[in-house]
Amino acid sequence: MNKNAFFNLSYGLYIITTKYEEHFAGCIVNTVVQATPEEKPKLVVIVNKENDTNITMKKTKKVNISVLSNEADMMLIGKFGFRSSREFNKLDNTEYILGKNNIPIITQNVVSYFEANIINEIDCSTHTIFLLEVEEAENLLDKPVMTYEYYHKVVKGKTPPKASSFSI
Ligand SMILES: Cc1cc2nc3c(=O)[nH]c(=O)nc-3n(C[C@H](O)[C@H](O)[C@H](O)COP(=O)(O)O)c2cc1C
């Protein structure tokens, strides 16, 4: 198998956030896809089972998604993409608002956000595929989004092993 073929799949970059009781968790993902366009649209997000965000999402059944602009810097991406919410509170020194669902939404270098309920979970070996129903959606900034290609080629960012895509 030529695994380089997988590098030609296109993605954006997102911060997903969730909260169970007093515990906040959130991480970077590249795996958000719109599944349906109905009245309450459905999204899919794929999260590694070892990520604290996955474990917290399964408890609370709610998640918010922030779409990063291409101005998001490595401080923000490093905090949410390379460290665990088990170690420290990622909200410290991060811009956020509270969603209607009472879960923080990251607003730092964010163009749009969604608030969603988790309505189904599919086991996918190392990862869980979460099916989401969107309750709220809003635009914050009129700026270009961070694509996965821009992240690798311009920001020169890396992908850790727990991402859904192959590491570069
Ligand atoms: C560019 C990039 C893309 C990523 N994509 C995913 C992804 O799609 N799914 C996932 O579970 N983790 C992904 N990650 C890894 C998580 O963000 C990372 O494991 C994080 O430290 C988990 O934090 P947590 O333990 O607080 O949940 C990605 C990280 C980066 C930097």
Image: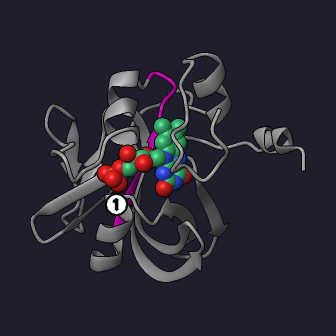
Q: Position of residue 39 (x, y in %)?
A: 55, 76
Span shown in magenta: 63-71
Say which amino acid is labelled 1.
Answer: Thr
What coloring was used for the rendering? one colour
Which image quadrant for residue 109?
top left
- Whether the residue under disc 1 has CB within 8 Å of ligand 1: yes
Total numbered circles = 1
Q: Position of residue 79 (x, y in %)?
A: 31, 35
In the displayed structure, 167 sits above or below 87; it is: above
- Tag 1 secondary structure: helix
Instruction: Specify whether 135 is left or right of 153.
Output: left
Prevailing secondary structure of the magenta residues: strand
Q: Is residue 145 magenta?
A: no
| Residue that appears at 48% across and 75% down | 133
Residue 28 in view of the camera: no
| Residue that appears at 60% across and 53% down | 164
Residue 50 in view of the camera: yes
Residue placed furthest toward the left? 22
